[in-house]
Amino acid sequence: MTHNECLFCNIYNGKEPAHVIYKDEDVVIFKDLYPASENHFLLVPKTHILNAKHLTKEHIPLVENLVKHAQRIVLEYNGDICDARFGFHWPPFNSISHLHLHAIFPASAMSFIKKIIFKEGTFWFVNVSKTDNYYYYYLILIRIAFIILFFFFFSLSMSYTG
């Protein structure tokens, strides 16, 4: 897929319709078409990064910027930061191949199914800290590395015929 074919690149560039609530030189924020709660926004960086798996330590400022915008949106919409959920779906569980942060609130109002889809601490939904803690982002990267190692060793054990 080229960047010209990417839905989120096209939304950022104004070539696809979306309910955009904020846009600057680094990020576009719009309402999710299939909200998990009363408020569900997607925060998409202008930089085309395929998904959370492709994040590196060099992307920490980018992720931090997305989180700050997400926190601001929650407060602007009179939400409660403590009842908000911020995170990325981990491939292959992401629907669009362009990094996007989900900002969902109130998280307590999500349906049972949505609570599973956006469950923090799972291998399919990587949550980000609600604070400005740099160490937390490193922990995410370490956790991701363990997940990759787990699947690597699992696939090796499945291919071993003894």
Image: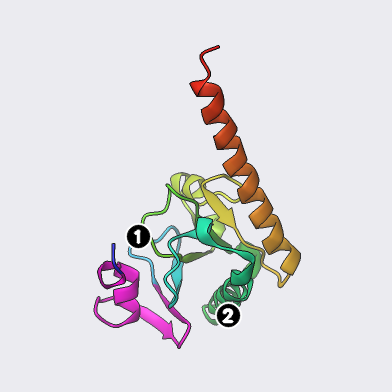
Which disc is residue 72 wearing? 2
**Does the rendering let one see residue 152?**
yes
Name the side, left or right, on which 1 lies relative to 127: left
Which disc is residue 13 wearing? none
Q: Is residue 102 magenta?
A: no
Boundaries of the magenta span: 3-30
Residue at 55% across, 62% down = 55
Question: To which residue does mark 1 refer?
Answer: 34
> Which quadrant is the N terminus positioned in?
bottom left
User: Where is residue 27 drawn, in percent x and y?
Assistant: 46, 80
User: Where is residue 75 drawn, in percent x and y?
Assistant: 58, 78
Name the side, left or right, on which 1 lies relative to 30: left
Counting other residues with Cα less than 10 Å from the Cα at mark 2, is it few (<14), some (14-19), or many (20 or more)? some
Earlier sequence position, callout 1 versus callout 2: 1
Q: Amino acid at mark 1?
A: Tyr
Separation (CA) of disc 1 from disc 2: 21 Å
| Color encoding of the figure | rainbow
Residue 126: quarter of image = bottom right
Counting other residues with Cα less than 10 Å from the Cα at mark 1, is it few (<14), some (14-19), or many (20 or more)? few
Residue at 51% across, 29% down = 155
Element carrying mark 1:
loop
Element carrying mark 2:
helix
The residue closer to the viewer here, 57 or 102, is: 57
Residue at 61% across, 63% down = 83
